[in-house]
Amino acid sequence: MIAGFKVAIALAVVGAVVGEFVGSRSGLGYYMLLATGNFDTPLVFACVACLTVMGIALFYTVGLLELALARWNRAARLAQSGEAAGAFGS
């Protein structure tokens, strides 16, 4: 279930931007569309950087939620593999 949340949170960021492309007067998607039409490349890259940071932060937030809610799962994986996992498992 948590794996589905990890995939969904990344797609939710993309969906929000597409929604702002279609019908919005504010938001990062709107500003990206406006900047693309005005050939304002630095603004486009700034929006993409903000969206990237937002997506990564939300993904790792779900990873922390997974650690908090499913400690038993991480312990079982460590016992099975016999090696230490990374910060969010591997």
Image: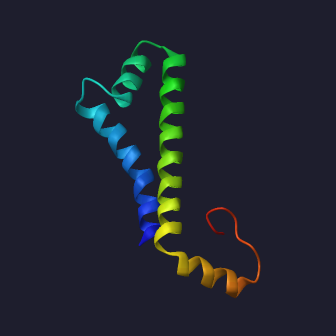
Q: In this view, does 14 lie to the left or right of 88?
A: left
Where does residue 34 sit, x and y in percent of width and height? 37, 19
Q: Taking 60 as reference, is 73 above or below it?
A: below
**Residue sitting at 41 percent across and 25 percent down?**
32
**Residue sitting at 53 percent across and 54 percent down?**
60
**Residue sitting at 36 percent across and 37 percent down?**
17
**Residue sitting at 47 percent across and 60 percent down?**
6
Q: Is residue 16 left or right of residue 89?
A: left
Residue at the right extreme of this rendering: 83
Q: Which quadrant is home to the N terminus? A: bottom left
Q: Taking 14 as reference, is 86 above or below it?
A: below
71 or 46, nearer to the observer = 71
84 or 33, nearer to the observer = 84
Residue 25: image quadrant is top left
Where does residue 80 sit, x and y in percent of width and height? 68, 87
Q: Is residue 11 left or right of residue 68?
A: left
Where does residue 72 sit, x and y in percent of width and height? 54, 81
Q: In this view, does 13 lie to the left or right of 46?
A: left
Q: How many labels does the image show?
A: 0
Where does residue 33 sit, x and y in percent of width and height? 37, 24
